Amino acid sequence: RVLQRFVETYREGAPTLLASHGPDAVTRWRDVCHSLRPACATVGATRLASELQAFEQQLAGSPDALAHAAKARRLNDELIGLADRLGAALGRV
C-alpha cells in the first residue's frame, strides 16, 4: 500500500519543484524537499532522499532561485522516474 500511495501521489512529480518564479520559490522548494525526503526514504529511494537533503542545504545557502532552477527540475524528473518504475513494478503504469 505504501508503494502504491507513493506512485499515486508522485506520478506527476512535485509541481512545486517546477515553479521557479516568485520571491518565495526557494522557500517552497525547501519545504517540498523537506516533505519529500522521508517519503523517498520510506520507499527505499535513499539516493534521491540524499539528493533532496543536499539540495535543501544548498537552498539555505543561496536564495537565488534562478541558480537552482535546473536542479529543481532534475529532481522532479527523478521523482517522476521513480514513481514510473515503482508503478511498473506494481503493475500499475
Image: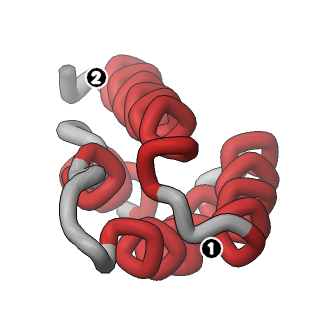
* Residue 81 to residue 47: above or below: above
Q: Quadrant of the C terminus?
A: top left
User: Circle 2 — which element?
Assistant: loop
Q: Nearer the viewer, residue 10 or 86?
A: 10
Q: Position of residue 9 (x, y in %)?
A: 23, 57
Q: Residue 22 lies in what quarter of the image? A: bottom left
Badge 1 or badge 2: first in the primary sequence = 1
Q: Which residue is mark 2?
A: 91
Residue drawn where x is 60% and y is 54% of the image: 43
- Rendered location of residue 16, percent (x, y): 26, 60
Q: Position of residue 66 (x, y in %)?
A: 44, 45
Residue under the point 34% across and 24% down: 84
Q: Which labelled disc corresponds to residue 38? A: 1
Decide if residue 86 is in sight here: no
Distance from label 1 to label 2 (Cα)? 24 Å
Image quadrant in which the N terminus is located:
bottom left
- Residue, x 55% and y 43% (percent of image)? 67
Task: Judge from the rendering whether residue 24 lies leftward or rightward of residue 55; answer left or right.
Answer: left
Residue kind at label 2, given as amino acid type: Gly
Q: Residue 24, which numbered label?
A: none
Q: Nearer the viewer, residue 57 or 91?
A: 57
Question: Viewed as shown, does residue 93 lie left or right of 84?
Answer: left
- In the figure, is residue 91 to the left or right of 70? left
